[in-house]
Image: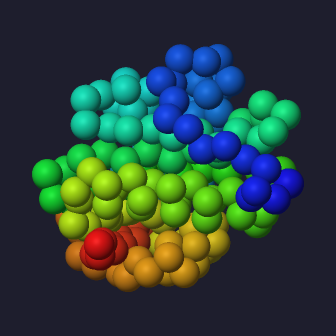
Amino acid sequence: MSIQRLRIERDDLRSAEVVAFLSEHVAELRAVSPPGSSHALHLDGLRAPGVSFWTAVGEDGELLGCAALQELTPEHAELKSMRTATRHTRRGVASALLARVLEEARAAGYERVSLETGSFDFFAPARALYARHGFTECAPFGGYRPDPASTFMTLALGP
């Protein structure tokens, strides 16, 4: 699968496939993170006002990945729920999703996008992806507190 063969579109989080995909995401994060250090949003959180959600779908209709953007302030948003289907990792799905979300964030007028991800080896590919897209480590933001299991990253959006 190449990134030319996927569609990235807004999603209403109603299909059984998306619900199952996100349930698997939350379960996996809870399994690899210390108690109290998993900050994934549940479906209700992803459906809340101020949250936009996208899915990446292959030309055959297969769900390849997802990402969300949650408004923190009118100038600052948080990247949430980035996930690529296991069998499609390292094929450009996450990069395409992230590029689209950052494009949408700029269009919405956000000046900054920040994120929280894990600090241990399981999350190394995610941290590398974010760094390739210009994110740098930062202090906890929003309602987060310092946590040795978390890495906080941010990106100032240019025009």
Expressed as whole percent of the image width and height from the top left, the position of residue 5 reads 79, 50
Q: Residue at x 38, y 38 (%)?
A: 52
Q: Residue furthest left?
A: 74
Q: Quadrant of the C terminus?
A: bottom left
Along the viewing direction, whichever of 73 and 123 lies nearer the viewer:
73
Residue 37 visible within the image: no
The N terminus lies in quadrant:
bottom right
Q: Is residue 155 left or right of residue 5?
A: left
**Which residue is at a point 34% across and 31% down the rendered structure image?**
45
Q: Nearer the viewer, residue 42 or 53?
A: 53
The reply to whether residue 140 is visible in this rendering is yes
- Above or below, 12 against 25 in this view is above
User: Where, by quadrant of the figure, is residue 106 drawn?
Assistant: bottom left
Name the spot of residue 141 as percent of width and height, x first. Answer: 21, 64
Q: Residue at x 29, y 75 (%)?
A: 158
Location of residue 74 in the rendering, given as x and y in whole percent from the top left corner: 14, 51
